[in-house]
Image (cartoon, rainbow, N blue to C red):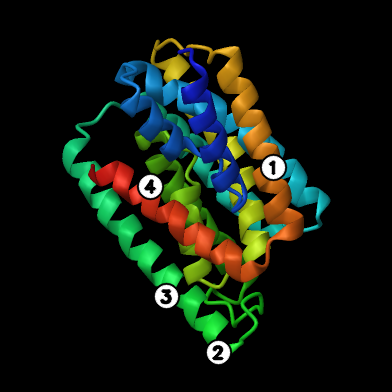
Amino acid sequence: MTGWPLAAAVAVVAAVYASVGHAGATGYIAVMTLWGIPPEVIRPTALVLNVLVATIGTVQFARAGHFDRRLLLPLVVASVPAAALGGWLTLPTAAFEVLVGIVLAVAAVRLGVEAVAARRTGGSDDATRASRLPAGAVWRSATLATIGGAVGLLSGLTGVGGGVFLTPLLLAFHAARVRTIAATSAAFILVNSLAGLAGNLAAGRSVPLPGLELVAAAAVGGAIGSHLGAFRLPVAAIRLLMAAVLAMASAKSLL
């Protein structure tokens, strides 16, 4: 997998996705598919790039003070074994990807409409609304663990880190502020990408190492995007970018 045009595409994907706390696996899968790379190489390669970009994003959002361990830990505890199981399984993908694409498209439209409405009304898009998570600590953790397990399984099955599934769910539950959700997604993606790779290895599949130019492109794009998301971009812009990321992930699944 060589060629600077592909590396440039990977850098753009990494920058856009990292700005909202994602790592870009769905985008990498899309561009590598367009470049004619074999499917058995695409999924583990996307996970390797995910680990790199998610690590950078986690560090950047944590430096900016947006990290919340209480939100992350229940999600991760349940997602790790589920992601490993998903990485080990091999399932028919056609109908599954259509369903995933429709769900992501609905989430993208909903998030985009909310962001535009907030900007037009002058409302604070970063204000924490009443959380829809259960009030009790035990029930709250159980709900987050359920979400984490479901998203972890999906991430392992589809070969992505899970951010495209986790972010709209946390936003729908009003679980935290937008940048905190982005920070949580970045750390969640890191852990689940590692678990997905472990599942691939456990199933006896090889994990090809990306070329140096792809690694450099993902690192540069991830650093730029996560810095903008953590420190520079207004929250309304982050919401719109989240909607765009979900729309791209939906298009990848459907097309």
Point 55% across, 68% down: residue: 139
Q: CA distance from mark 2 to mark 3?
A: 12 Å
Tell me the tag on residue 113.
Answer: 3
Q: CA distance from mark 3 to mark 1?
A: 27 Å
Q: Residue furthest bottom?
A: 121
Residue at the location (39% across, 22% down)?
42
In the rendering, which numbered label is found on residue 224?
1
Q: Position of residue 153 (x, y in %)?
A: 40, 41
Q: Quickly name the residue at label 4.
A: 249
Where does residue 128 sit, x and y in percent of width and height?
65, 78
Cα separation, mark 4 vs mark 3, equals 18 Å
Badge 4: residue crowd in 10 Å (few <14, some 14–19, many ≥20): many
Give the residue at mark 2.
121
Amino acid type for the residue under numbered disc 3: Val
Q: CA distance from mark 1 to mark 2?
A: 30 Å
For label 1, count other residues whose C-alpha is less than 10 Å away and answer few (under 14), some (14-19) or many (20+): many
Between marks 2 and 4, how big is the CA–CA gap? 29 Å
- Mark 3 or mark 4, which is nearer the start of the sequence? 3
Q: Amino acid at mark 2?
A: Thr
x and y, in percent, of residue 143 in the image: 50, 63
Q: Residue 220's image quarter?
A: top right
Q: Earlier in the sequence, mark 1 or mark 2?
A: 2
Q: Secondary structure at mark 1?
A: helix
Instruction: Look at the numbered discs 1 and 2 and tell me whether their residues touch, using CB distance below 8 Å.
Output: no
As drawn, 170 above or below 77:
below
Q: Is residue 163 above or below residue 5?
A: below
Amino acid type, callout 4? Ala
